[in-house]
Image: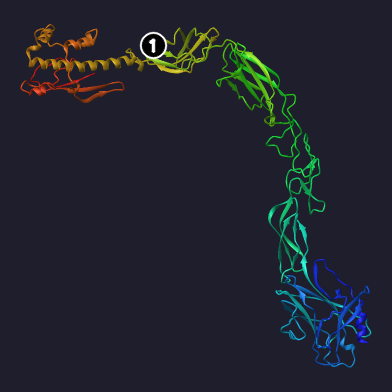
Amino acid sequence: MTMDYLLWVCSLVVPVVLAVEETLMDSRWATTELAWTTFPESGWEEVSGYDDSMSPIRTYQVCNVRQPSQNNWLRTDFIPRKGVLRVYVELKFSVRDCASIPNIPGSCKETFNLFYYESEGDAATDSSPLWRENPYVKVDTIAPDESFSLLEAGRINTKVRSFGPLSRAGFYLAFQDLGACMSLISVRVFFKKCSTTIANFAVFPETATGAEATSLVIAPGACVNNAMEVSVPLKLYCNGDGEWMVPVGSCTCVAGYEPSSDGTQCQACIPGTFKSKFGEGFCTPCPSNSRTSARGANICPCQSGFYRADSDPPDSACTTIPKAPRNVISSVNETSLSLEWEEPEDTGGRSDLVYNVVCKKCLRDRSPCTRCDDNVDIAPRRLGLRQRKVVVRNLQAHTRYSFEVQAVNGVSGKNPIPPVYSTVNITTNQAAPSAVPTVHLMRSTSDTLSLSWLPPEKPNGVILDYEIKYHERGQAMSHTVTSQHSSAKVEGLRAGSPYVVQVRARTVAGYGRYSNPMDFSTSLHSDPQKSVQDQLPLIVGSASAGLVVIVALVVIAVVCLKKQRSGSELEYTEKLQQYISPGVKVYIDPFTYEDPNDAIHEFAKEIDISCVKIEEVIGADTIRKTPKFLVRPLSPSTAPRFHSHSIWATPSLPNIFDPGAPGLSSSLF
């Protein structure tokens, strides 16, 4: 009767399926006998039954409660591990309440034990491994939540236990009965895993749980198609319950692709739309003057005649070049010109409009105009103008010019055609000369200033005369004088007073601009204070005189020497006596001759210049030096070899002919 009741309970089993569980073994899959190993043979018994869908199932039951000291073992077939570290066992069973069974000893149990045994293969036999707790590893003692009596309907208990970590190729499950009346309805062995998932546009593979219930297993991720990593590393943690947690890193859709409606894929932009940047944004229609017919576009190419500047973002509208400036107005003032114009009728759809002004000089013949020289000044500048007005200066008088006013914007450089422009042709007028560069003081006295200056750099015609304007510093009243040349002498000034002087030139077109003011002062005394240029003749003359004196001194010394040594110098002596009166010492001034060289040749004879010794410089200023010479007359008894190197006199001092004189010091100016 007890066995029949257990078969009825088996027909009430309802299978349970979990989405993240993979089954390694399920006794309900068997269509024939399970034929598990039992020990002893009088213990567990395999029986058939039906589940709730009336499908046949195989179960095991045992009920030897009336016999004491029960030790009944039931072992499953070999179960491959498939690389998992931890497995779960789901047991469905029912247990008879010991109290509801009459006339049984006190050894009746309502529990059973669960064991496992790891092996590298299906090597177990009826006697091996031994039927005991070691070598088998105990998982747990299984107790029912509910038991049943004879008068009650069967109550199905479901228990799940896990064990690990596993390391061998597979394992066996074993059940130990110690005296219960029970039915093992089904046994399912499975492992938990985190199923394939997509998070943040990254796909993470199916991942088994770890060796422990609290383990976290890292699963590396990879971006879905048409996505890119924006933060790394890509990983997701699989916990012991088979659930994903703690995502790290993310991906996003690349340019030209947008997220799908479910947020798991990146789909291409349809024709006519684009997406210029990576990210979670969506595709947008092409901007103005652009189009695309391809899928997955990250930019819409511009239509013909339209462009994007290098600085324009890819999602900006395409624009074109501007038209020419309008209504260019010119105003000529001698050699200056002002130009004004209006904005083009069409700016090309851009706000970065600027203007260029090109100056061309045209000759009177029919040759092409050429670019103006760099000295032509266009203010504020030639290129990149934002204002619509310029002033042109330093043009040549009576010259024809052509000016081009160009309008350009940020895409003008993309267009192969040169910028469009408006042209204005002008001819300059006769112009006054430019300013006198600078004024120099040549000489000053107590009441005059002698001035000179350079002509203007641009005379713009024939210079008729110059006007010199001057006034005493600190005085408002000024005076003017004119000069036909580039120099003038201003007279009637006060002694020792500073004056401010300016000069300007005049042509038939009028006066030019004055030179920069220059300060000059008259001298305090009547003797003229000579300028540097005025002193140059004095410097040259002094130097020449000094040289002549030296040469004359040497020549006279040689003549005197020859006079003492030989009477053959009578001719020279007689000639000299023409100029000597009794009791008079003669001084020969070479400057009384028209040519000083004549005096030298007549009264002197040349000696080696090395015979003249400069002892020291006794005075000097910025333009000349005053040397001190040493002249040594020697006695007649001096050795002849010294006479040829003696210096007797200098024509700048009275002649000293006393042979006994110990020496002569002379200064030369």
Q: Locate residue 190: give its quadrant.
A: bottom right
Q: Nearer the viewer, residue 303 or 622?
A: 303
Q: Nearer the viewer, residue 489 or 540?
A: 540
Q: Residue at 88% of width from left, 88% of height from top? A: 99
Number of callouts in the render? 1
Q: Is residue 161 left or right of residue 490?
A: right
Up-down: is 152 above or below 482? Answer: below
Q: Locate residue 535: give its quadrant.
A: top left
Quadrant location of the C terminus?
A: top left
Q: Is residue 518 left or right of residue 207?
A: left
Residue 432 point in image, percent of width and height: 54, 11
Residue 305 point in image, percent of width and height: 74, 30
Residue type for callout 1: Thr
Confirm whether residue 104 shows in the render.
Answer: yes
Up-down: is 592 above or below 143? Answer: above
Up-down: is 528 above or below 229? Answer: above
User: SS at mark 1?
Assistant: loop
Q: Is residue 98 left or right of residue 664?
A: right
Up-down: is 253 above or below 337? Answer: below
Q: Locate residue 358: give its quadrant.
A: top right
For disc 1, the marked residue is: 448
Q: Residue at 37% of width from left, 16% of height from top? A: 496
Q: Nearer the viewer, residue 84 or 179?
A: 84
Residue 151 point in image, percent of width and height: 94, 84
Q: Residue at 70% of width from left, 52% of height from top? A: 229
